[in-house]
Image (cartoon, helix red, strand yellow):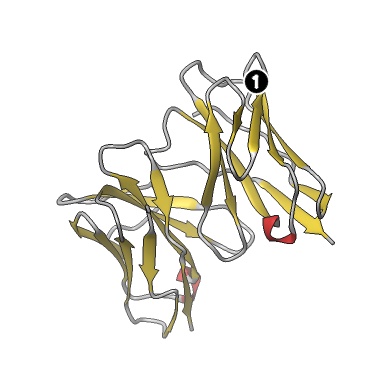
Amino acid sequence: GAVVSQHPSWVICKSGTSVKIECRSLDFQATTMFWYRQFPKQSLMLMATSNEGSKATYEQGVEKDKFLINHASLTLSTLTVTSAHPEDSSFYICSARVQGMDEQYFGPGTRLTVT
Amino acid sequence: DAKTTQPTSMDCAEGRAANLPCNHSTISGNEYVYWYRQIHSQGPQYIIHGLKNNETNEMASLIITEDRKSSTLILPHATLRDTAVYYCIVRVTSGYALNFGKGTSLLVTP
């Protein structure tokens, strides 16, 4: 149990285009999902916290208008990178907190390459 | 969250025990020690956590010193698939965003 999936697992897009990444909790409900970003040879850095039915909370330095987060249901959160640039190329990882419990599980990550 | 200090990297021979240390001298009484690992290009994987007693599960053992200022994650029989970055995180709960820090890069060699 407690599986989190991400789609796509990797994506290549051209500079200036937008790309959407999905994060799904497959066998549990998640009131809260977290989005992290990881650049090569660096650790995971929290980008934003997403609560179902409300606006996401972004970490300092993360542009909310560039990284659009939608958490419309208890099993799905999406991250849209708008007007992507090469510096947005990174490994994006989501995690989901089990509703009513103090546990979170991580997705497998999405590798974004912007050319 | 209390700050943690881990060695940057460690090597371990396959089949031997891997002992990964973590210092957390400013840990508070209600903070747990969590360990996660990240295999290359994958999402983090939960390993184990503890408050003050030693813990063991199918993946690893966690030894926490009596003063709780440090801990050691033990992989009893390391395999090549255990090569990963291991993160020691101190937190009241794991249900909120985690500060991963730099972790320890463990290389298991044949």
Q: Image point 67% across, 34% down: which residue? A: B5
Placement of B83 over or under A91, stated as above or below: above
Placement of B20 over or under A26, stated as above or below: above
Q: Image point 19% across, 51% down: which residue? A: A52
**Residue A19 in view:** yes
Relative image position of residue B74 (x, y in whole percent): 70, 38
Location of residue A81 (image quadrant)? bottom left
Seen from the viewer's position, the closer of residues A33 and A27 is A27
Q: Chain of mark 1?
A: B
Seen from the viewer's position, the closer of residues A41 and A76 is A76
Residue denoted by label 1 = B69
Instruction: State how many labels appear.
Output: 1
Q: Image point 40% across, 42% down: which residue? A: B97
From the viewer's perspective, tell me whether residue B73 is left or right of residue B91: right
Residue type at mark 1 is Lys
Relative image position of residue A32 (x, y in whole percent): 28, 47
Relative image position of residue B65 (x, y in whole percent): 68, 20
Q: Image point 59% across, 50% down: which residue? A: B37
Location of residue B107 (image quadrant)? bottom right
What secondary structure is marked by label 1? loop
From the viewer's perspective, tell me whether residue A99 is left or right of residue B20: left
From the viewer's perspective, tell me whether residue A61 is left or right of residue B25: left
